[in-house]
Amino acid sequence: MYKRKFTMKTFILAFLAFSFQLTVSFAQNPLFQHPAGMITPQVVSCYPPQNFTHFPLADSLTITFGQSTPINSASLTDSTFVVMGQQSGWHQGTATYNGGTNTITFKPIKPFFAGELVTTVATKKIQYDSAGTIVPIHGFAWQFYGAVTKQTRATFQDTEHLNPEGFTDISALADMDNDGNIDLLYQHAPGDIIAFNTGNGLNYVNTTLSSEGNIFPADYLHRGFIDIVEGYFSCAYDSNKGNRTFSSGRSQTFNSPGSAITMVDIDCDGAPEIIVGGLQKGTGTTLDTINVYSVIGDSIIKRQSIYVGDISIMSSGDFNNDGAIDVYVYAGGHSEILYNDGAGKLLPPQTITPNVAGGLNAVDMDNDGLLDLVGWTGQGVEIDHNNGDGTFTPFYSNDRFDASRYGFNVGDCDGDGLMDVVYTPVTDTTFIVIARNIGNDQVRVTQEIAENTYLGQGAEVFLGDLDNDGAMDMAISFDQTGTIVILKNDSSVPPLAVVQSPVSSPEGYVLNENFPNPSSNVTNISYVIPTTETVNISIYNTDGQLISTVVNGLVTGGANAATYDCSALPSGVYFIRLIALHVTLTKEFVHYV
């Protein structure tokens, strides 16, 4: 046993080195499980990988197709290769094509928000050459999360209480005025409210809309502004005029009286569908039918209705990694998945076990590339591990049993690349619980925040970087008292120095130490991948900032090498990170001047 001098600087460097050296493995079963003829042409790989949880906020995206069907580059624009941030909206950018590798690369103009869900769609408007005939591709969609760039201890401070008075229920977080700040959207009577963030995440300027109801924000028409569909039994399309004002459209038939809602592009046309729990034939009081609406112009058109029984919760994601987004629902006392047929139609529900009864989210909790289910049951927080064959294995974190089915969400609260859980417990003394993801499909409660005054049961919990510091903050609505609470992530508290066993690399993937190391100018990076696939190799500093991209494209399987000229960098510690189809690997190197 030995001792060494351990300063705060060495603590931070040691933690960052650990964070970056952590090897994140992905599923070894094929990620792209297309039914015959569903995806034309076949997708070979995409970057970031499907369901990735920590994509660098300013990186380019790539998708590689089969060699036998070249893409028509004239069909590529940012309206045919669509990138849509849940909070940042439609991302304009440049789409380019490499005919040698049959790879599309998209470079967004603006970065993503830390921690936000991003949906990327190679739409049916992209064309390819099929035996001399130009025809549209079938479409391919995948989702990932922007990286949380600041490591913290996931310790939150009760910072600000907003009191709109009356019924208040947060529906979404989104940048509604393109100022780079995340705003709050919440249901309120007599009109829903957009609370525009002034920049620090604490002060807001309110705009009241003309209608009340569920709020569905998205840039449906690719105008560069996030519009709104809002309503219960009727709805209106509110067009964003770009100056914090909205023009409300005509009233239209709608069937969304409850809170079982989700939004996602299920037909690969580049615009999200609105998927809601409704009443069969508009009668009764129990949500029993899934209604799918498309937004065409300013019209909201019902495309499909599927009877499923008593609906409690709903979520969405690509559960079988086939490039088409599916829908999960807890209905009639059963967990069910409505798989997408690949043409934008939801198939009849398939019952799965076990049952996640409340607060459900679909997210990759163990970074294996497959969507898991996490939610509330009678045994507390439950993580249902996706086995990749249509079945799920339950894991219970039973250090707390009173997780609520009301306020429940997931996000990377500490910046370690793993998705954590936040929820409102069934108690009058504690209004929020933070449970960190400790790996192995387990979460551990690390903070409970007590009420200073009675707030009631937290109805909704949302996570987002409200002050643009790279860490996730929290907004909670309490509909009983008409209060919104803002909790800031306390980045002044040093991250936890968690000691974990090394995670082994999947077979066939190797990132060797660069040579020379330390290096003063050019250094050589050698690596091995088992098959031909898309590879990204990038350089980061100890703050997690992207410095340079060395490799980004299709690479032949086997031993490969690249060089990086680091002569322009200041002296210090840097990290080389490799992302391939099934793995993320990182090595540390030292540069000196």
Image: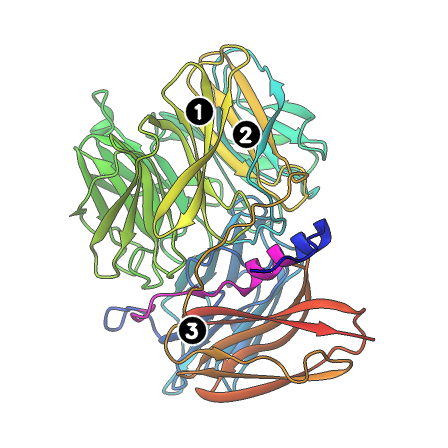
Crowding near pointer 3: few (<14 within 10 Å), some, many (20+)?
many
Compared across the picture, whether 225 is left or right of 120 comes to right
Q: Which residues are magenta?
A: 14-32
- The residue located at (68%, 84%) in the rendering is 516
Residue at mark 2: 475
- Which of the two residues, 519 or 76, is positioned nearer the viewer here? 519
Residue type at tag 2: Ala
Residue at mark 1: 213
Residue at mark 3: 45
Which of labels 2 and 1 is toward the front? Answer: 2
User: Which one is earlier in the sequence, the residue at label 1 or at label 3?
Assistant: 3
User: Which one is earlier in the sequence, the residue at label 2 or at label 1?
Assistant: 1
On the image, the x and y values in percent for residue 511 come to: 52, 78
- Which of the two residues, 228 or 5, is positioned nearer the viewer here? 5
Circle 2 — which element?
Answer: strand
Mark 2 → mark 3, Cα distance in angstroms: 36 Å
* Residue 29 falls within the magenta-colored stretch: yes
Q: Is residue 270 above or below residue 349?
A: below
- The residue located at (70%, 35%) in the rendering is 243
Which of labels 1 and 3 is toward the front? Answer: 3
User: Which one is earlier in the sequence, the residue at label 2 or at label 3?
Assistant: 3
Circle 3 — which element?
Answer: strand
